[in-house]
Amino acid sequence: MTTIHTLGFPRMGAQRELKFALERHWRGEIDAAELEGVGRALRARHWQLQREAGLDFVSVGDFAYYDHVANHIQLFGCEPVRFGFTGQEASLARYFTLARGVAQESGASGEGRPALEMTKWFDTNYHYLVPEFTSESTFSLADERLFTEVAEAQSHGHPVKAVLLGPLSFLWLGKEKEANFDRLNLLERLLPVYEQVLARLKSMGVEWVQVDEPILGLDLPPSWRQAFEPTYTRLSVVGISLMLATYFSPLQENLSLACRLPVKGLHVDGVRAAREIAAVADWLPSHKVLSVGVVDGRNIWRTDLDEVLRQIKALRNTSTHALWLAPSCSLLHVPFSVQGEAGLDEEIRDWLAFAVEKLHELRVLKQALAGDVAAEGPLAQSRQAIQSRRSSPRVNNPKVTERLAGLSADADRRLSAFPIRQAAQRERFSLPLLPTTTIGSFPQTAEIRAARAAFKRDELSAADYEKAMKKEIAHAVAEQEKLDIDVLVHGEAERNDMVEYFGEQLAGFCFTGNGWVQSYGSRCVKPPIIFGDVSRPTPMTVAWSSYAQSLTQKPMKGMLTGPITILQWSFVRDDQPRSTTAAQIALSIRDEVCDLEKAGIGIIQIDEPAIREGLPLRREAWREYLSWATRAFRLSASGVADDTQIHTHMCYSEFNDILPEIAAMDADVITIETSRSDMELLDAFGKFKYPNEIGPGVYDIHSPRVPSVEEMERLLKKALETIPAGNLWVNPDCGLKTRGWPETNAALQNMVTATKALRTTLA
């Protein structure tokens, strides 16, 4: 018999119930007990769905009220000392303090308590909270949540497979907060707590524990590779069955290591590491379970079940392992269910499978492998949908193909080198030293959301919607004028999401009504689906930016999303190279850039927060990716004159190892997130001698706290140690759409005040 399971399931709920409950709790509208009630109901519902789909286990431990890595910080009792917890606080209150920080109390000194740093979970658009480690860090079994949830599942009669982040991946994903210290040295302190957790789960009757070690798909230093065998030798003594789970990347040089580890089973990503499955089957001892991720947990297309069956049957002919089938990774990265998409184009809808449907694909595979006639109907439906997508005339546009083929060799190059452009731009804009700006968006108020929702429901006419949005734009411009910000933005009131907004206006995209995916905390995004060739039928932003510019004498930035971010934050077609799709998007953005320039917009920001995220996890594949990714950005930006200033923005990424490629993007100004890392990222820019202008973020917009003037001035002085004053801009870390106006104005006022104070010392 084939066993089927999932590595994880979406947390938010079919209607984003958890998101709304979290936000009500943070506003003080419901208490912790009510929030916990929502969590229990969602877990019960999701476990039931897994059992109804025929899964042999329900996964427990994948649920989180903010982030699963933060769950482990509490489980292992390693909340940073800097938060000053006394132990008397409620666990959930401490948890949200880790995630969101605490504003400076009125009349108090210091800077409040900034939240944990946040960064991308491998190469996904999910953000995790970064554990902080010092040589004094200690660990203890300090939280009951995992065991409570196991007991919940058992009370519903479900067989449980518990889910843990492995000890080496947990340490790897953290950050050292002192010099000359290696967090791997903490492993010996951490392992006894893992042993306690496993022993506790065993005592509760849990048979299998899925231990995620995704870092086995990375290029690991020798010391980390060498730590795996003694670690799992020690954990195996507990006597519970361990399923070591890897995903997102091939194992490569770590393949034999993973197969040799003393665990009961090994899960491998059969989508991203399809070529390794046969080698894994050869290396893995025959008494161990082989779990293969045959359903794509990162994308939304139906699985070609006939092809998977062919592969699995071939594997069975050469392998005697007990076989488990699963998605390639947690289903956290896909929407809940296609069943919520009644308004989606029927032809395209039939090509899709979200989390619930992917569970049912596993059931069909299990039935087919067992010779169950119940699989025949679903297999026929799958076959028809796969063929429909392959043959649909809606997928390919010959004009797009011809335009790409006809590009000149220098289509991705500006007319002049940066020093010449910089001189032309300084003459045109006459900005002060340390010019201030924001990243683009301003608060998306209840009024803005209500107007957008009414417009989508046809309860508000196009003319009235435009009037409402222009009112919000005028307000944003007026507030920036009052604050005396130097380069303004229109605030993006008309935009639902920085990718969805553009995708809605580009050919080759389609959109779900309820295809939400968690990005971090309560923040959800609804990624577009790129099903065909991409082009721009008409201008997308010109009218809004032109209106905003008409309201002020100060420069107004045009705001666009870059081709790699649109690619990364969409569900992308898998029938052509991603590089080709990226180039198609780049030409569409290029058309918009040129039209903004013609309309008199002289500063244009093309956001690329996802370019680092798109890096393959294996360094050997970086060069190829960075070549086509940076070319795509340059294609989008290089159709303008020297005195048009191109900005880009990147956030929540480590840039040290790709600075030459970032410089090769040749943006006139780059703005980056640096406040949570206390400007640490700038060290690399300074050592590299980054040639163009740069705006390091001086405050964290993901936290409600308002940093003081002194705090921002300190960060700017630190930035000036690395970046020449003539090349330094001042801005927040990221866009302000999730914040409220009072805190936004207060923070920006402090930012401007700090900047003006510093200018007087530089004059």
Image (cartoon, helix red, strand yellow):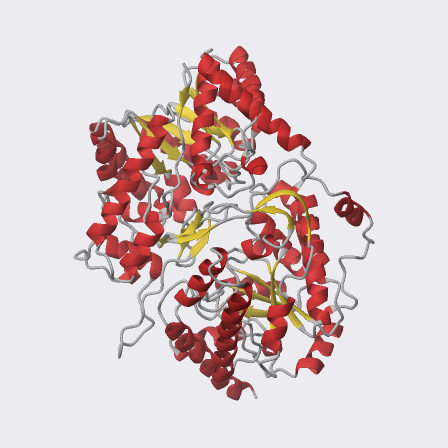
Q: Nearer the viewer, residue 498 or 751?
A: 498
Q: Nearer the viewer, residue 616 or 735?
A: 735
Question: Can residue 611 be seen from the camera position used here?
Answer: no
Q: Position of residue 705 (x, y in %)?
A: 35, 69
Q: How many marks?
A: 0
User: Which residue ends up furthest to the left in the rendered image?
Assistant: 88
Identified at 46% across, 33% down, the residue is 246
Q: Position of residue 737 (x, y in %)?
A: 46, 65
Identified at 40% across, 73% down, the residue is 741
Q: Position of residue 378 (x, y in %)?
A: 50, 22
Question: Can residue 485 be seen from the camera position used here?
Answer: yes
Q: Nearer the viewer, residue 334 or 219?
A: 334
Identified at 77% across, 43% down, the residue is 398
Q: Position of residue 185 (x, y in %)?
A: 37, 46
Is residue 435 placed above or below 322 in the rendered structure? below
Is residue 220 placed above or below 387 in the rendered structure? below
Q: Nearer the viewer, residue 508 or 107?
A: 508
Q: Is residue 536 left or right of residue 199?
A: right
Q: Classify the position of the N terminus by image quarter.
A: top left
Identified at 57% across, 88% down, the residue is 763
Q: Is residue 228 left or right of residue 139?
A: right
